[in-house]
Amino acid sequence: MQPHEDLLGEVNSILSRRNPKQPWMTVRGLSRHLKKEYERSVDFAQLETMLKVYAQEPGRTIRYSSYPRRQSMDILWGHTANVGELKYLPALQRLDEPVEYSASQVDEAAPWFFISHNHRDLAHVLALRSQLMDRGYGVWIFESEISQGGEIPASIKGAIQRCKHFISYVSARSIGSLWVQKEVEAALGGGVQEVHLVVDGDDVRLLDLLADWRPLKSPDPELIEEYCLWAASSIGKARNNVWLERCRYFMDHLDEYLWRTDEVVVAFPSPKNKDLWAGRAIKLKSLSEFVEDEHLTHN
């Protein structure tokens, strides 16, 4: 048996014995088990490279998850006996062409923004990106910054760690997105210095819901449930219970996000009824007001 086949056998054994309710592991978790059970020390990168190759082989019994780990964006691995089989694994690498864009020419010391969003909000996000770039900021979004053939989880993880500012673009389309939730979890876990909420200023229901929010005291759960049901229905996911549960999860954790943002919410596009927010516990700002704050200056 070749050395890598021996190692694969040990990894197979570890993953096959996982609790089916918690079947996934990262290479860091696997390496700890390999050290404890087999006294084998392995390099993280080499182990993951080996597993990526093996996952493409016919008859393989190990595959990766469609989504990475929440807090770290690391790839998750599982045994097919516990996680099931997929005839075609989703690509870890970006295979399509990035959107056409001009690389932002910014000062090396200028802060960078990571914008987490759902692809359905791309038109607003591109406009937001353009306005931030016009003010001299660097902006990272999936559609333009991951090159063709680039590895998606690693690229996102590295960008979150490099960017000073993290924007979660909150909309009826994004609150049920698993990718958005994983990116937010990674940012809140210490990946960036500043976390900001930018909400869809065209969504009157969302603005009304946030206007009544209080620090550590969210609105009536029935109002949140009503918004989640409407949000899912508005994008054709009214019968998708998984999507609805993610909407509820996001809204349940919104207090934590607001605490990290000092109860300041940016609306983009700027809402027409901004004056209604005067005196509210949560302060609403336009993008222009937001970028003029002292903590966003290029120091």
Image (tube, helix red, strand yellow):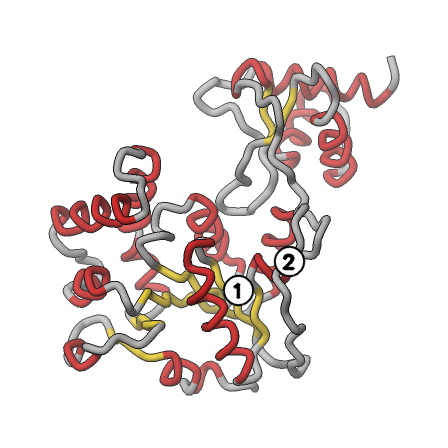
Relative image position of residue 85 (x, y in whole percent): 57, 19
Q: What residue type is disc 1 on?
A: Phe
In what quadrant of the picture does the N terminus appear?
top right
Residue under the image location 75 percent in, 33 percent down = 47
Which label's residue is closer to the chain start, 2 or 1? 2
Relative image position of residue 127 (x, y in whole percent): 46, 72
**Circle 2 sits on which residue?**
98
Relative image position of residue 13 (x, y in whole percent): 65, 15
Q: What residue type is disc 2 on?
A: Pro
Tell which of 267 and 161 is nearer to you. 267
Along the horizontal axis of the image, is 284 left or right of 123? left
Residue depth check, mark 2 versus mark 1: number of the one nearer the observer: 2
Residue under the image location 44 percent in, 51 percent down = 180
Answer few, some or many: residues within 10 Å of disc 2's Cα (few below 14, many 20 plus, some between 14 and 19).
some
Residue under the image location 58 percent in, 24 percent down = 78
| Mark 1 element type | strand
Along the horizontal axis of the image, is 201 left or right of 83? left
Relative image position of residue 191 (x, y in whole percent): 53, 58
| Image quadrant where residue 29 sits | top right
| Mark 2 element type | loop
Mark 2 vs mark 1, CA separation in Å: 16 Å
**Circle 1 sits on which residue?**
114
Q: Is residue 209 above or below residue 280?
A: above
In what quadrant of the picture does the C terminus appear?
bottom right
Along the horizontal axis of the image, is 14 left or right of 204? right
* Mark 2–mark 1 CB contact (< 8 Å): no
Q: Is residue 258 above or below residue 15?
A: below
Number of disc labels: 2
